[in-house]
Image: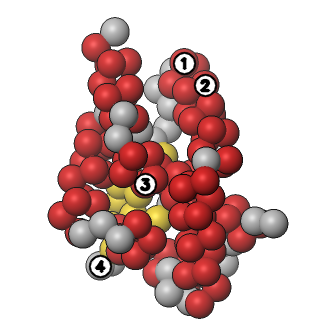
Amino acid sequence: MKELAKVFKALADEARLRILNLIFRTGEICVCDIESITGFTQTKTSRHLLYLSQAQLVEGRKQGLWMLYSIAKPKDKDHELLLGFLKTLLQSNPVAVQDAKELNNNINKGCCTTFSVIKPEIKPAVLELN
């Protein structure tokens, strides 16, 4: 029960939900891209990513100069269902949709290091916005 409470505490913050939304939409994203879209400082972004990581919602990996984050692999069926439900909820949230549009604009301008430098062959789901 304590682990479940930790997850819900992590989800009880708008900044962390915005970060999760960006990760859901790209699959993997670097810290600088999160900062660019949200307007958060590096300190605030890192603090929230650490919180999400401790709740086992995201995982990070180092790629050259970049720290990349993705959704953590679900540890069980309940965790998988929760992540799926959260992803669905965020797809229609007005703030999440606006962040996705901003991310799409940045990717199209070539500003997103995740897709313009590290993995240019990958097209994120956010490019499929209507």
Q: Is 17 on the left-hand or right-hand side of 121? A: left
Q: Left or right: 112 with respect to 31?
A: right
Left or right: residue 105 compared with residue 9? right
Marks 2 and 1: in contact by CB < 8 Å? yes
Q: Dot 4, crowdedness within 10 Å: few (<14), some or many (≥20)? A: few
The residue at 29%/79% (across/down) is 65
* Residue 58 in the image, given as x and y percentages of width and height: 40, 45
What colouring method underlies this structural image? Answer: secondary structure
Q: Position of residue 76 (x, y in %)?
A: 51, 21
Residue at the spot of label 1: 78
Q: Amino acid at mark 1?
A: Asp
Q: Residue at x 24, y 69 (%)?
A: 41
From the image, tell me which residue sits under label 3.
19
Residue closest to the eye, 123 or 13: 13
- Name the N-terminal-most of marks 1 and 3: 3
Give the spatial CA distance, label 1 vs label 2: 5 Å
Say whether disc 1 or disc 4 marks the residue closer to the N-terminus: 4
Considering only order in the chain, which callout, 2 or 3, is on the residue closer to the N terminus? Answer: 3
**Circle 2 sits in a helix, a strand or a loop, which is it?**
helix
Badge 4 element: loop
Rounded to the nearest angstrom, the CA distance separating label 3 from label 4 is 20 Å
Count residues near mark 1 (Cα–Cα under 10 Å), then give few for <14, some for 14-19, many for 20+.
few
Disc 4 designates what residue? 65
Q: Please identify the quadrant where the C terminus is shown.
A: bottom right
* Residue that mark 2 sits on: 81
Task: Compute the Cα span from label 2 to label 4.
Answer: 33 Å
Q: What distance separates the C-alpha of mark 1 from that of mark 3?
A: 21 Å
Q: Nearer the viewer, mark 1 or mark 3?
A: 3
- Amino acid type, residue under disc 4 in the picture: Leu
Query: Which callout, 2 or 4, points at the residue further toward the start of the chain?
Result: 4
Split into 4 quadrants, where in the image is the N terminus? top left
Mark 2 near mark 4, Cβ–Cβ under 8 Å? no
